[in-house]
Amino acid sequence: MKTHLLGFPRIGAAREIKKACEQYWRGKITLPDLAEAGKRQKRYNWQLQQEAGIDLIPCNDFSLYDQVLDMVLITGAVPERYGALESLPETDLYFAMARGYQQNGLDVTAMEMTKWFDTNYHYIVPEFTAAQSFRLRPHKPLEEFLEAKELGIAAKPVLIGPVSFLLLGKEKEGGFHRLDLLDRLLPVYSELLQRLAEAGADWVQLDEPFLVTALDQHTKKAFQTAYTYLKEQVPALKLLLATYFEGLHENTSLACSLGIDALHIDLVRAPGQLKQVLNRLPASVILSAGIVDGRNIWKNDFARSLTLLSEAEQLKTEGRLWIAPSCSLLHVPFDLELESDTRTLPEAVKNWIAFAKQKVREVATIASLASRGDHAGNDPELLENRHCIEERRNSSLITNQHVQQALASVSVEMTIRNQPFRQRKQLQQEKLKLPLFPTTTIGSFPQTKEIRELRSRLNQGAISRQEYTAIIRAKTADLIRKQEEIGLDVLVHGEFERNDMVQYFGEQLEGFAFTQNGWVQSYGSRAVKPPLIFGDVSRPRPMTVEMAGFAMQQTSKPVKGMLTGPVTILQWSFVRDDQPREETAFQIALAIRKEVLDLERSGVPLIQIDEPALREGLPLRREQWKSYLDWAVNAFRLASSGVDASTQVHTHMCYSEFNDIIEAIGKMDADVITIETSRSQMELLEAFAGFAYPNEIGPGIYDIHSPRIPAEKEMEALMDKALDVIPAEQLWVNPDCGLKTRDWPETEAALRNMVSAARKLRARY
Ligand code: GLN
Ligand code: ZN
């Protein structure tokens, strides 16, 4: 039984590649230095897999920024606006596409970025035109293959398959569909495969994750065309078609009939597909079973994996069964051995989890256990694994009877506000006495270097908690004065005390653990450290009441309490796999609900519960959307509905696509929602108008992602557009997201313009 990997994390255990890229961008190291850092990382990754006994090691899964952008360069699909940069070294052209280019009198914008399926990884969106041409630049995959070969490793190059590559992109003009470009793209792929075969490649992996989504006829046809062609053109090379993140569903026959040599399926997300695939897989095709979770950090249950594999017994005896992680290990942290702080990651919990390096070993171990069949029953590794799995299952760290009871006694009434919106609006108006077009912000204000350094000094023990709090309070008081001076109507405390909108809460909740080095690439050189939810979630004490109280004492204006919603906390963490996600979401919701009630009790008149990740939780398969949205909305309602009618609940979301979820947003029944709209010129408000959204809306009227200061007129014009579709009494005036990444001068100037735009509007209404 062969073992292989679809891909390995590439930022490095200590984020070496992130650091090298950033140093290169700052001119601190040279291009050869950067290439050398890449080489070192690749070598490290390959040798790690080799030592673990992996048979088929991937190459070209490494990337200095993003694997889709790599394909843009490889296929020569470089957008026209980079034409003037074609003479630069390839790596510079590459980074220019990723990050934009402002040098030597040139000013070229970056390519767009979007989420990679249902993960938190962001890829660069290829841009296509009707007259698109492609041209092979084979350097990267060829060089990586040869680098591995030099180390004595016969690697398997990984590429994004031609159909998925086109589907991942976007048409930059009308009159054509990007799949129409397939005929022009295929010769480039076949030439590349040819070159790889000539260099000695035996296998090539083509990732076609779109095969797990619903496909129209046109797309199905494209898959047939592509693979028939490639097989004809390069018959000697063996092709592994990789699918992941879901089951193949109705595309099973299609995937099995593409004439490929091996098919990889995700048996973690969709174990049920094994039977269907076995029924349809031609006798000549190898099945790669993705059984080690590439999306989560729990240890594999070997016994369960072996049972699943035994279903494919016959393939095993024929040598047609391979074993792999479910998807690339890009989505999990590098190495658990680097974790040593038992205060944030208890020893017991550490014993339940596996990061990329550990998962590689799991793959090898499962393969060896499976090949020994019944003889493996008393294998020490199997016994040890069983012990860990049982320990986790029975651990007292996981269950909290109070949480279980509280969850069992949740009633429908707890998810319904005690009065309908119309009445609430009136009561809230009597209490808050806000003007028409009230102005506010989304919560955070610039998190300067000074504040981040202060926090790292606290963590290193260089300053005391008291000193830290005193400085944070001074900053908060200062911000309250600034907001009063700017003339905002609803103030915020600024979130200076928060390292991150999920981690800050996770650190104060039970059932969460944290890592020191558990970095996962989010995009380019950016990495995040998701918390781990390992047990029942509860809130031992108030989390934000003190700061909110302090802020309120500084002003007579209303101050908004600021919380992160249950779905977002869930979505941006590694979530336990021993209960449905929704159950964990409800536990978090109960904890947030308590916080909401404590805030209300301490006199906070408005409470914002952010749900920026609600939309990204949408399942890949549309037929599962309804059930997801039902529980996601319910979790929000459970968190928010305990308050009195006169307490105003806000929520905030930031993305520019609301059409799919507008009904669900309506059902959340927040009194006010603030949303990102400025980049789409208010167009998405039509979704709200079309749905006759009854509650209040704050369409973001300036883009906080740019340091640009929007003019008063510009914002007034945007509000006029909003007024075309939404009545004045429903509208708020605010930026489109938190201001933490901005600097002070531009923030102040922009907010002043925003407030005066609101005043102009009021004068007209
Ligand atoms: N309240 C958060 C902030 O202002 C919201 C962040 C977000 O939407 N991602 O930073
Ligand atoms: Zn936002």
Image (cartoon, rainbow, N blue to C red):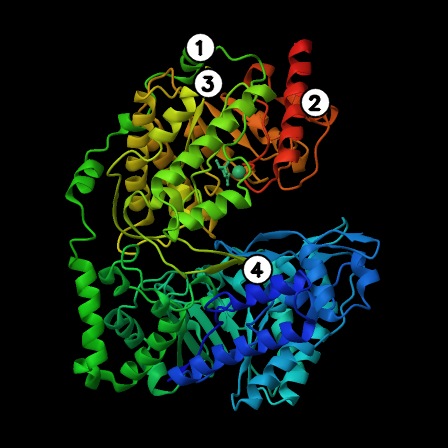
Using the image, determine if residue 319 lies above or below residue 71: below
Callout 2: few (<14), some (14-19), or many (20+) C-alpha neighbours within 10 Å? many
Secondary structure at numbered mark 3: loop
Which residue was labeled with disc 3? 555
Residue 125 placement: quadrant: bottom right
Q: Name the kind of residue labelled 1 in the image.
A: Gln
CB under 8 Å between discs 1 and 3 = no
Residue 512 location in percent, x, y? 30, 50
CB of residue at label 4: within 8 Å of ligand 1?
Answer: no
Residue 540 placement: quadrant: top left
Using the image, determine if residue 497 lies above or below residue 724: below
Which residue was labeled with disc 4? 525
Q: Which mark is residue 658?
A: none
Using the image, determine if residue 668 lies above or below residue 33: above
- Identity of the residue drawn at 67% across and 58% down: 98
Q: Marks 2 and 1, Cα distance to the nearest angstrom?
A: 27 Å
- Which-is-in-front pick, marks 3 and 2? 3
For the residue pair 466 and 21, the one nearer the viewer reads as 466
Residue 324 location in percent, x, y? 41, 74
Secondary structure at numbered mark 2: helix
Q: Which mark is residue 716?
A: 2
Which residue was labeled with disc 1? 426
- Which-is-in-front pick, marks 4 and 3? 3
Callout 1: few (<14), some (14-19), or many (20+) C-alpha neighbours within 10 Å? few
